[in-house]
Amino acid sequence: MVFTAASQTIIITPILPLIGSELGVEVGPLGLLVSMYSWVLAFAALVMGPISDRIGRRRVLLFGSGALVLALALHGLADTFGTLLGMRVLAGAGGGMLSGAAVSYVGDAFPYERRGWATGWVMSGVPFGLVIGIPLGRALAVEFGFRMPFVAFAAVMAVAFLLILTIVPQPDVKLSENRPTLRGSLQQYAGLLTGRGTAAAAATYFLMYLGLGLFIVYLPQWLTLQFDLEVEVFGRPLEVFGLPLDLIATLFLVGGVVSVLVGPKAGALSDVIGRKPLILTSCLGLAVVTAALPYVVTERWAAYPFYIAVMVLFALRMAPLQALLTALVPARQRGSFLSLTIAVGQIGTGMGAAVGGKIYAGFGYEANTIASAVAILLMAGFVWRWLPEPTEQARDKPALEVA
């Protein structure tokens, strides 16, 4: 489920140039496909957070995966930019149902001492999307048009829906006894945003995804203008299953392989040495690499080691950060809290994409990377100063025994 949800989100970035060419859209408005999706996802996540605390994560996972199957299948009908934008809004609603529930499920099902390991494995669906979903999705878009990847992801999400229905249990945790209401939800979110640790977590997520939106959305556009995208091996175009893989597809492929290897290990390492040391190390390294990328990547081959470094550093902070967040509130508030942080993060992505388009058009990609590095350093400051490492007394007891 995480693999498919992540792939259908990330695929927009590497196929933006293809969408613009096929639909006749300028570079600037293309960022709306990312920002509108992010904002709708944020709203849906906020709505579903309290509901998941009341009815349990399993039901929300079923609702969200089923909704996303339908939304992605409808992408095959998009014949104008406005229609495609509408389909991304529908997909954002489905993705919002899933975003908080996936990590909350880990928090419900695993003890804190193993949540780094568990989160690393569950969220490895994201880098698996980079390894498999994005290169194949890019290849399908090049060969058959930009609609085909979304239709293919609809089929895969349908399989995930069936697996959740038949295999995934509801963890035995105490659910909220409060009936979700608009007033009650707003009061709960207001309380979370005024708590010192929870507010710092929300700010951390916002800055993390703001930096990501500024950096990643227009990276394929910059690469398209800088280099010849064709990749050859022994004088022949590189293909997989008969589909051509170009520079952008292989870049995501290589970065994804590294993330698959690093993500679970980073989560397990954070179980031993703590979450914050890894998060801070990642932020500092990522700020340097991000700011340097457009100045150092002057040859096509140089894009690979730099993108690998970006993905390694991003993996080093993601699993530890998510594991840390699961312990900041009790189980009955976990869905609401994680949905809040993810919603705030998606708002950051949307702002990064929207502002990044104007920065890219006005000042070039170098300005995007510098702005991204600033956001990353601000995130490190929030983590260091205000984000707490949970004490032993604050950690939940295991909800499910793990064999």
Image (cartoon, rainbow, N blue to C red):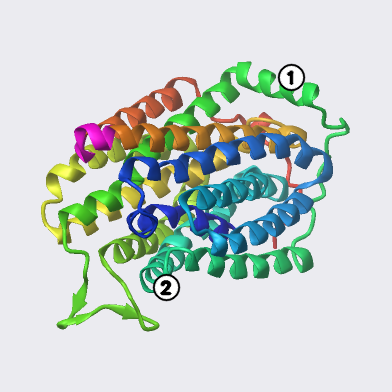
Work out which quarter of the rendered image holds the C terminus and state it: bottom right
Residue 131 visible in the displayed image: yes
Vertical placement of 134 versus 101: above or below? below
Residue bearing mark 1: 187
Magenta region, main secondary structure:
helix
Say which of 191 and 271 sits in front. Answer: 191
Residues shaded magenta: 359-366
Residue 388 visible in the displayed image: no
In this rendering, would 294 be left or right of 39?
left
The circle on residue 144 is 2
Q: Quadrant of the rendered structure where residue 397 is?
A: top right
Vertical placement of 227 versus 60: above or below? below
The residue depicted at 44 percent of the width and 20 percent of the height is: 385
Q: Quadrant of the rendered structure where residue 184 is?
A: top right
- Looking at the picture, which amino acid does disc 1 mark? Gln
| Label 2: how many Cα within 10 Å (few below 14, some 14–19, many 20+) | few
